Image (cartoon, rainbow, N blue to C red):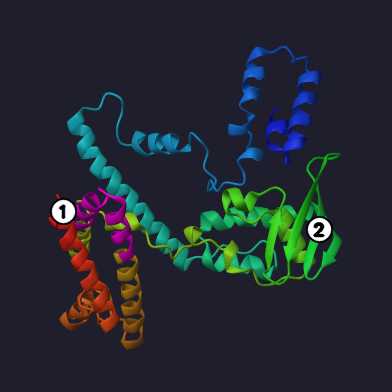
Amino acid sequence: MSHVVWNSYTKDAFHRNWNVFLTKYGLGGNKWLSKLYEDWHIWIPVYLDHHFWAGMRSTQRSESMHLFFNKFITRNSSLRQFVKQYDNCLASREQIEREFDVAYFYTVIPCATKSAIGAQFQHVYTHEKFMEVQAQFRGKVNCITRSMHSTLGFTTYEVIEQVFNSTFNKFFITYDAVSREVKCQCLLFESRGILCHHSISILSFDRVDNMTLKYILERWSKNIKRRHTHIKSSQDEPLLEPRSKRFDELVFQSHNICEFESESEELTRILHWEFDKVMAEMQEYKERSKGKSSLCHEKATLSDVNELQSPHVSKQEAGSRTDLDQTWKKRSQMP
């Protein structure tokens, strides 16, 4: 049954393998399996792999939370003990993240192959994610690749993978040489964000040595900025407290604005428009700041802050804002 569920890479193959499974073991009249089969569209991977799950399972969130807290509390812990130990949990997690950050930047996991594409992932990804990628590079040795047909740079490949001694799976992969996009029938990248060994096999076959950034996800990068570090905790270092305070103030003001604006579609549309404009201005300011110096948020001068808070407004923008102000006044006068 495990083979039917996980190794059926097409919908037709699943239904065919399921019927063979029932016939082989005489389970055609099993009520539980019949009930389970009725819901195939919500639990069979081939029906779900076109969605991105980041490698998570349905029970993984609760399991990880239990593992996280079980080191510090038990079912007999009092509420007071829980509050105290919760703080210790956060301190432990932050310390582990710092240690991982140091390991990522000062140690390197050797590539299992001489592939230039593998070196790209090695340079960007965290150790844990790179080891998963390495497993896919090693898996391509079990694949036999041949080109089916090619038209205007768009090529279809057939990859035959040896699973066991006498068991082989066949996959069809398409590769666009112009956009450098690859799509495999197994949909591993679409569901887990990792390039499968079938795709790696045809890239090696086609002598591709530079992977497009589409397949190097920022979420697996060792340079990723963790947004939860903005949340204030008792473990914060003194240097981080001003930033946490500013973050809290912005969240508070944003919450009040969103609560008010969400009362109507028009107000929500106005807020979206303002958000987009402010984001564009912030990005423009950030680019200008890069040209001036490597000034960070903690060392920004008063003039820089004022420039950010009061960006240059053109006549056209000023007119738009005036119209917006008039709209607000008319709305406030309405019953």
* Near-viewer residue (11 or 82): 11
Graded by Cα atoms within 10 Å as few (under 14), some (14 to 19) or many (20 or more), the crowding at tag 2 reads many
Rendering coords of residue 179 (x, y %): 67, 70
State the quadrant of the N terminus.
top right
Most extreme residue toward the bottom, as rendered?
Answer: 292
The overriding secondary structure of the stretch rendered in magenta is helix
**Image mark for residue 245:** none
Rendering coords of residue 34 (x, y %): 67, 18
For mark 2, what is the residue? 157
Q: Amino acid at mark 2?
A: Tyr
* Near-viewer residue (316 or 191): 316
Instruction: Please state the extent of the stretch shown in magenta in the rendering.
Output: 251-273
What kind of element bears circle 2?
A: strand
Q: Is residue 43 visible?
A: no
Q: Is residue 61 above or below residue 117?
A: above
What kind of element bears circle 1?
A: loop
N-terminal of the pair, mark 2 or mark 1, is 2
